[in-house]
Image (cartoon, helix red, strand yellow):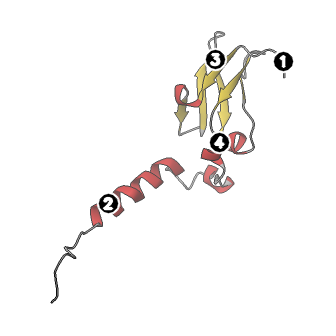
Amino acid sequence: MGAYYDEVEIEDMAWDADKRLYHYPCPCGDRFEISRKQLADYEDIATCPSCSLIIRVIYDPLDYEDYEEDEDEDGEEESSETSSGDEFEEAMEKLTVSDATTETH
């Protein structure tokens, strides 16, 4: 594609859990939007539904390669990033360390 209005890093965009979209303010008053599915499909163009402006989203495609389409269903309330973080936290809480330095002679 030709001219982008701007290039924006994904970290600067806000995640809308209700609409399941990343968004970023557009000068027209609306907002640019892009979904996780689009990012997983290597699409890096966020569009504004109210005007013709587009932005290029800078992101690491590897962060979205494990994206599954069924994550967009209404039944799942947490994002994959959040649930992965929760699983890690749970594992850390359950982690026990034993002292294996006993000597046998």
Q: Picture coordinates of residue 52 (x, y %)?
A: 78, 16
First in residue order: circle 1 vs circle 4: 1
Measure the alpha-carbon separation of dots 4 and 3.
Answer: 20 Å
Label located before the other in sequence (4 or 3): 3
Which residue type carries mark 4?
Arg
Distance, label 1 to label 4, CA atoms, is 23 Å
User: Outermost residue, bottom direction?
Assistant: 105
Location of residue 22 in the rendering, given as x and y in whole percent from the top left corner: 59, 32
| Label 1, residues with CA under 10 Å away: few <14, some 14-19, many ≥20 | few
Cα distance between the residues tagged 3 and 1: 22 Å
SS label for mark 1: loop
Left/right placement of residue 92 relative to residue 65 reads: left
| Nearest the eye: 40 or 16 | 40
Residue pointed to by mark 2: 92
Q: Find numbered disc 2 in the image and state the secondary structure of the residue it sits on.
A: helix
**Residue 56 shown left or right of residue 102 in the figure:** right
> Type of residue at label 3?
Asp
Q: Is residue 103 above or below residue 25?
A: below
Query: What is the quadrant of the C terminus in the image?
Result: bottom left
Q: Which residue is mark 4?
A: 36
Q: Earlier in the sequence, mark 4 or mark 2?
A: 4
Write down the residue under mark 3: 30
Nearer the observer, disc 3 or disc 1? 1
* Residue 53 position within the rendered picture, expressed as x and y whole percent measured from the top left: 75, 15
| 4 on left or right of 86 | right
Q: Nearer the viewer, mark 1 or mark 4?
A: 1
Distance in Å between CA atoms under marks 2 and 3: 42 Å
User: Which amino acid type corresponds to the residue marked 1 in the rendered image?
Assistant: Gly
The three-letter amino acid code for the residue at tag 2 is Met
Between disc 3 and disc 1, whose residue precedes?
1
Residue annotated with mark 1: 2
User: Marks 2 and 3: CB-CB under 8 Å?
Assistant: no
